[in-house]
Image (tube, rainbow, N blue to C red):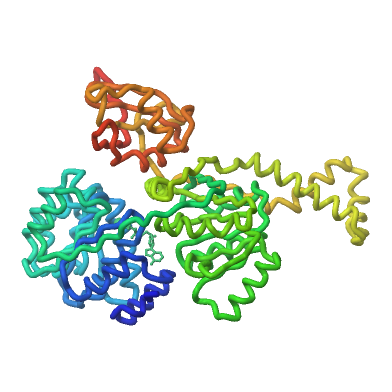
Amino acid sequence: MVNFSDFALHKTIQQAIHDMGFEEPSPIQEQCIPKILEGVDLIGQAQTGTGKTAAFGLPLIEKMTNQNAVQAIVLTPTRELAIQVSGELRKIAKYKRVRTLPIYGGQSIGHQIRALKQGVQVVIGTPGRVLDHLRRKTLRLDQVKMLVLDEADEMLDMGFQEDIESIIQETSSDRQTLLFSATMPQEILRLARKYMNDPQTVAISRKEVTAPTIEQVYYKVFERSKLESLCRIIDSEDLELGIVFCRTKRGVDELTEALQERGYMASGLHGDLSQAQRDKVMKSFRDSTIELLVATDVAARGIDVGNVSHVINYDIPQDPESYVHRIGRTGRAGRKGIALTLVTPREMKQLRTIEKVSKSTLESRNVPSLEEVMERQQTLWKQQIVNLLAGDDDLTPFMQVVDQLKDNYPVEKIAAATLSLAFASSITFEEGDAYDFGDTGASKGMVRFFLNIGRNLELRPPDLVKEITELVGISSKAIGKIDIFENFTFIEVSQDVAPFVYEAMRHTRMKGKRINLEPAKPRVKRNQ
Ligand code: ADP
Ligand code: MG
């Protein structure tokens, strides 16, 4: 097993990795990091979610010096990705004096110019805006030692080829060039031949894996209300013993604590625990003093417990292989097992990859509503009260309170008020939707999207409905008005599923064409 400490990374960076909670390098990281540190040009190909950012980010930050000039530039297709990559690089550079700055369209250019003037070593930007700064001479790339093309296939799909080439020409020719992509179409290889120096290729191919035949379900959740969703899901299941998987050690600690606060019997397991601590956790899991074991992939690897009723992927696994490993922890010895996976909008594509590669189908289910959870809670509350009534606990002090109140209030009301006092903390509610599509000119409760294909490709409403309901796992009821024109289409979908439709549908293929889906602009009023 390769460890992060096996790489020749400075201790400040090792410390940052530890803080980020990464337990071991992912396959793409394992292979890329030493090569990038050596200084060769490199093409890295691996699926979304496999950790490509840190694969280039760790050696990139390692190589930065305190020279006050832009030493590295990372190009990404969208502003969201620029912000995301910048955030990850900033975490890696936590203990090192390296300044990173995302620059993208839509943000005030004046603000970016001021930030650039302060001195920045790493720029992460979208091609259009980077070019804009180069033309204004507010950004210089002649000291760039490292150029990274991240999500290169998406950049080309979005028509950035020329911009990218113009930017590359502004950098010095002795730079190191890295290219990362989920797919390797011809145009990318052509770009690589033209601008890279004898590049080495690292490709993480998908291993064929087969998922066990157990019940597999996924829930569409939002990042912001993930914890709430998890609790509702747990509360609605007949859970005997469950393993909840998180991506990082940090994630394990945070989730374990949050679950404990909410009254669940949960313990965390990850590589930072001592052997004695691990043994203790495993013992309590084996003899069922806890109901939930929260773990990283690495920590769960050695676990062999027979009666795990549920595997819950709180964070979606990084690849199909680890999905299969995880869910294999349940359904042992002929028992019925259930695997539940939480999927955020951004992760829709990963879900489909997992399904395809592991040759399994995950049934889409909705996170139980508050009413459904409450209904279930009522049964539990009743049970607890019955237990108490049947037991021999001394209720005298409480009886006195009831006695004093019952002259003025009906006993039923007193009982209900008492219940609400006792159980109020078990009812929490928080809906979250981080996506703001703005005014899209949609009907109430809906979001209207623009799709760049129409009658020209013989698109008909039923085709579109079928495509969306299958890909996004939603009911056709969530789809509203569809207007198909010659070259484009407008489609309305219900607000709560709109982020999932958006992330799952943009940059996919339909009718043999690469499609683009974006929030529609509000209709312009005529005669004004
Ligand atoms: P990609 O660019 O391949 O789509 P990302 O770099 O965005 O993937 O990584 C996906 C997620 O996995 C991020 O949240 C990242 O912080 C996390 N991650 C990356 N490497 C590791 C690792 N070695 N261990 C745990 N989590 C990781
Ligand atoms: Mg990426």
> On the rendered structure, is 107 left or right of 131?
right
- The answer to whether 177 is drawn above or below residue 236 in the figure is below
Residue 376 in percent (x, y) is at 70, 44
Which one is in front, 88 or 467? 467
- The answer to whether 99 is drawn above or below residue 461 in the figure is below
Q: Residue at x 20, y 77 (%)?
A: 65
Q: Quadrant of the N terminus?
A: bottom left
Which one is in front, 338 or 180? 338
- The answer to whether 346 is drawn above or below residue 258 in the figure is above
The residue furthest top is 527
Camera sees residue 409 = no
Ligand 2 image position (quadrant): bottom left
Q: Residue at x 23, y 58 (%)?
A: 180
Residue 410 in percent (x, y) is at 88, 40
> On the rendered structure, is 20 left or right of 102?
right
Q: Quadrant of residue 365?
A: top right
Q: Residue at x 42, y 58 (%)?
A: 321
Residue 209 in percent (x, y) is at 42, 54
The residue furthest front is 334
> On the rendered structure, is 155 left or right of 382?
left
Which one is in front, 448 or 110? 448
Camera sees residue 511 = yes
- The answer to whether 105 is drawn above or below residue 244 in the figure is above
Residue 226 in percent (x, y) is at 51, 52
Q: Residue at x 60, y 57 (%)?
A: 332
